[in-house]
Amino acid sequence: LEPVEHLASQVLDADDRLYPDALARYVNFLDKHAAAGVAYGERTLINEEGNPFGLEWRAVFNKHPQGDVLEPILRRPFLSTPSQACLRREAVPSAECVGARGQAGDWLLLANAALGCQFAYMGKPPLVEYRIRRGSLLRSVASDPHAATEIREYRKVIDRLFSLPGIEGRFDATKLAHVRRAAEASCFAIKGQEFLRRNEPDTARRYFSAALRAGSRDS
């Protein structure tokens, strides 16, 4: 690849794997889409042994918002992993803004980028193999089917999302409260999906019902 000054960061988790042509595709796409600060595409899910599972290249209900995606990404983290995205230098948030990634910290990373940059969808085929481990942070949210129906694992990141510098200038107070409720609903839906994956349909139903009450589009 020729050096490209604007190609600042491809956030690859340690156990994910880029397809051989991924970096070339990112460079070519960003060269052709000067307005895009973040380019993103599809992923293939792989298990702990590295074997694909689920649908070949995309989630069934995922949409592909482009341009100003701040509201869509606040409502729901529409990328499975930031490994699906490549950020120009100006789109990379400071360490102070993002902090430790932790539970749902990738959501915070991408929302920070969306505050000041346009997103563009690259289409298929996939760019990265995203490894799902049985003991991952995502899987761990569905550890106790008998616990109260709540989203304490996500409260901290939601608080940080809705106190990002400059966010109040993008939405009025009524709209911001509405989008926050949608984010909370998405977290209930995410937990419901994980309980359904664990073959806990009654618990999953409780979480999906909570998501519907909060106004989720995902359940």
Image (tube, rainbow, N blue to C red):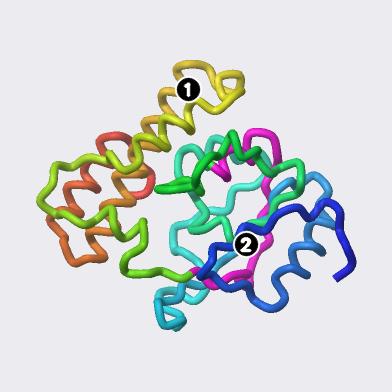
Quadrant assignment for the N terminus: bottom right
Q: From the viewer's perspective, is the residue at label 2 or at label 1 nearer?
A: 2
Q: Is residue 116 magenta?
A: yes
Q: Residue at x 48, y 33 (%)?
A: 161
Q: Residue furthest left?
A: 146
Q: Which residue is mark 1?
A: 175
Point out which mark residue 41 bears.
2
Horizontal arrangement in the rendering, residue 193 relative to residue 174 (left or right): left
Q: Is residue 175 above or below residue 148?
A: above
Q: Is residue 116 above or below residue 142?
A: above
- Reply yes or no: does residue 215 show up in magenta: no
Which amino acid, by three-letter code, is at mark 2? Gly
Residue located at (16% from left, 54% from top): 144
The crowd level at tag 2 (other Cα within 10 Å; few <14, some 14-19, many 20+) is many
Q: Position of residue 197 (x, y in %)?
A: 26, 65
Rendered image quadrant of residue 188: top left
The Cα–Cα distance between marks 2 and 1, rounded to whole angstroms, is 29 Å
**Magenta range:** 109-130
Residue 56 x %, y %:
49, 76
Kind of element beneath mark 1: helix
